Amino acid sequence: MSSSRPAPTSTFIGADQLPSGSALDFWRWAYGDILDDDVKGAFSEWMVHRLLCVPSERRASWANSDVITPEGVRIEVKSTAYWQSWKLLDEFGHPEAIPKHQINLDDKKIRFQGLKARDSTAVPDPTNEKNFKSHLYVFVFQNNEDPTTWNAFDLKQWEFYLLPASTLVEFGWQSISLATLRKKFKRMNADEFSREGRAAIKEAASGLASA
């Protein structure tokens, strides 16, 4: 499978007239805008890996959990933001003179969806019901209201929430609003999340070992 993961400098081969472009050019073209919803989701998973010091060689988009620690602790990462690229750019990727959509500042309408999911690694089975598949759930919110200063790498612009699956089961939540998270649970910055997240992983790993 190494050929499917080219080096950044890899270029086209196999034709007399070769188009220009490297693997790095492709990554910039397809994934260079972290404000895109799908790219933001992948970035958030990568960021959580780094903050929690969980080793990972690559993203496995089909896995049942976004983060799996060496001890077997499973973590789901849900992310969103005030802004998305489709609100600011036209179909050619050019900035709109006037954004088509206004920013949504109502934290009751900002929701994290899909907390339950079917087993994505199992043989297709109509009895495969949706369930909570991870031990811990991380909710990350990019809270910068100004798209001109939006910076995914600025950790001050993110807020983090950490919930065990048992809490979601207790309340029966299949989605959760930002308002609920802010009201009921601790809002953490990156440093707090890194410390408390690693402690939660250690506790969950201990429970798995004794089960």
Image (tube, helix red, strand yellow):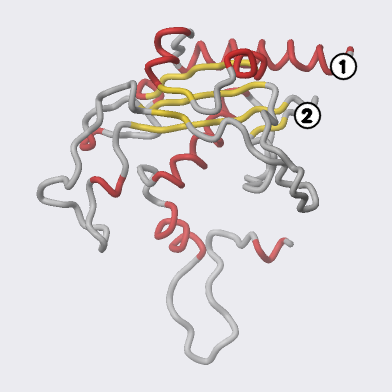
Q: Is residue 153 left or right of residue 206?
A: left
Task: Mark 2 vs mark 1: give the one in front.
Answer: 1
Residue 2 picture quarter: bottom right
- Could you tell me which quadrant the N terminus lies in? bottom right
Q: Position of residue 80 (x, y in %)?
A: 41, 33
Q: Residue furthest front?
A: 127
Residue 128 against residue 164 in the figure, above or below: below
Answer left or right for 18 relative to 148: right
Which residue has dot 2 on it?
A: 70
Q: Residues within 10 Å of mark 2 (few under 14, many from 20)?
A: few
Residue drawn at 71 percent across, 38 percent down: 129
Screen quadrant of the C terminus:
top right
Residue type of the residue flagged with mark 2: Pro
Are dots 2 and 1 in contact, CB under 8 Å? no
Which circle marks residue 91 in the picture? none
Q: Amino acid at mark 1?
A: Ala
Drawn side of residue 41 relative to residue 126, left or right: left
Where residue 40 appears, as percent x and y from the top left, is: 44, 41
* Front one among 156 and 97: 97
Are there few (<14), some (14-19), or many (20+) residues within 10 Å of tag 1? few
Residue at figure coordinates x 53%, y 15% from the top left: 193
